[in-house]
Image (tube, rainbow, N blue to C red):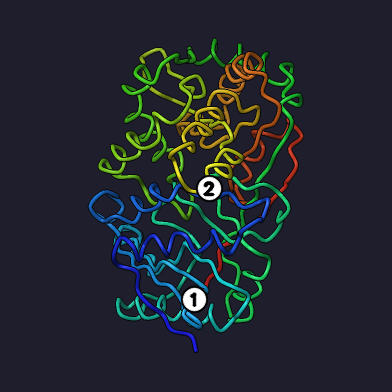
Amino acid sequence: MITIQEAKTKNELIEFIKFPFSLYKDNPYWVPPIIADELETFDKTKNPAFNSAEANFYVALKDNQIVGRIATIINWDEVNHQEKKKVRFGWFDVIDDIEVTKALLEKVYELGQKNNLEYVEGPMGFSNLDKVGVLTEGFDELGTMITWYNHPYYATHFEKLGYVTEKEYVENKFPFANAKPEFFEKINELVKKRYQLKPINFKSTKAVMPYVDRMFDLFNESYASLSSFVAISDVQKEYFKKKYISFINPEYIKYVEDKDGNLVAFAIVMPSFSKALQKANGKLFPFGFLHLLNARRNSKDVVFYLIGVHPEYQNKGVTAVIFSEYHKTFTEKGIENCFRTPELSDNIAIQLIWKNFNPVVHCRRKTFRKSL
C-alpha cells in the first residue's frame, strides 16, 4: 500500500531532501546537493520565492520506507501576470514503480484543481534560476550542481500517465582548446570600437557587488521574450546576491558597459563543483567546505551559468567581447573543459553564439505537461 505524507517539520523536510541520497547511492553521475542549502530553499521565512509562490512537499511511503518525493508549486506571478494557469511540480524522485509516481502526481492535481488551474508542468522549480527538466539523454554524464539527475524510467512514467513534452532543453560541452581567438578577436575589436563598449573585469567579490542589481535588471530584460520566463523580483535579487555571488570566483564574472556606463551585457561562469559535492555528500562540515573551496580554486572545468545581452545589442557581436575576456582568464587558469547549463532547444540565438566552438550535445532534458 502506498501512502502520501506531507513533509512540514524540519526533520520531515530533511528526510524529503535525503531520499535521493539512497535512490542514487553509488551512482557515479548523480551530484548531491548540500542538505542545509536545500533546507533553506524550502524555508518560507528565508526564500523570497515564497513571496509570490506557494509550495508543499510530499513523500510516498511503502512498507514504511520512503519510495518517492515531490514538491507541488504555484508561481502566482506566472498565473496572475502572465495568465498561465499552471501548477508546477519539482524535486521529483521515485523508485521504478509507476503507481508511486501516479500517487505523488495526484497531489499536484489536487493543488491545481483547488485553484482552478488548467494544466500541470514539471519538473521545474520556483523560478528560472532553479533546476529544470527530466533527463532524457546523458545518463552516463556527470551532472552539475544546477541540474537534476534522474533514472531513465522517469520520462517513461510520465508518458504512460498521459503526459506530453512541453519544453526541450539541451546541454552542451566543448574543450577549451576549441575556443580559438581568431573566431572572436577581430569582432571583439570592431564591436568595442563601433559601439564604444568596454569590458569590466573583477579581482574581488567586493568590487562585483555594486553591479549586481543592474545585472539582474539586465537579466530580466534579456530573457523577457522567452515564453517560460518569469522576472526576478527586487527581493529575490537580494537573496541571490547574498547566496550565490560570494560563492563565484570574481574573475569569472564579466560585464560590458557602453560609453555612458550602462550595462549592456554580462556573463557568469562557475567552476565545476560536481566532484567536490560528491565528496561532500550533502554536508559542509567537517570537510565538505574544503572540497568546495579546492574546486573553487583549482577546478579545470567551468560551467557557463548565465549570459545576458540587452535587447538593443543582441545580434551585434557583443558576446565576442565577453569571450575575449574569458579566453584570457581561462588561459591563465589552465581551464580544460567548458559546459553549458540547460538551454531551450528552440533558442536558436543562444546556440548560434557558440557555433564556432564546435560544442556537442551531451545531455537532453524535458519538462512534461498534462491538462487538468
| SS at circle 1 | strand
Amino acid type assigned to the residue bearing label 2 in the image: Asn
Q: Quadrant of residue 56?
A: bottom left
Q: CA distance from mark 2 to mark 1?
A: 21 Å
Name the residue at 72% across, 21% down. Answer: 183
Q: Nearer the viewer, residue 303 or 1?
A: 1
Q: Residue 153: give x, y in percent of width and height.
A: 66, 71
Q: Is residue 113 above or below residue 335?
A: below
Amino acid type assigned to the residue bearing label 1 in the image: Gln
Name the residue at 42% across, 64% down. Answer: 16
Name the residue at 61% across, 31% down. Answer: 302
- Indicate which disc residue 212 carries: none
Residue indicated by mark 1: 65
Q: Residue 314: give x, y in percent of width and height.
A: 53, 32
Q: Nearer the viewer, residue 64 or 168?
A: 64
In the displayed structure image, the side of residue 371 where residue 110 appears, left or right:
left
Q: Is residue 336 above or below residue 99?
A: above
Q: Is residue 306 above or below residue 139?
A: above
Q: Residue 21: give x, y in percent of width and height.
A: 54, 58
Decide which of tag 2 and tag 1 comes sooner along the chain. 1
In the displayed structure image, the side of residue 178 where residue 194 appears, left or right:
left
Residue indicated by mark 2: 281
Give neighbour class at mark 1: few <14, some 14-19, many 20+ (Cα, 10 Å): few
Name the residue at 32% across, 34% down. Answer: 242
In the displayed structure image, the side of residue 21 where residue 140 appears, left or right:
right
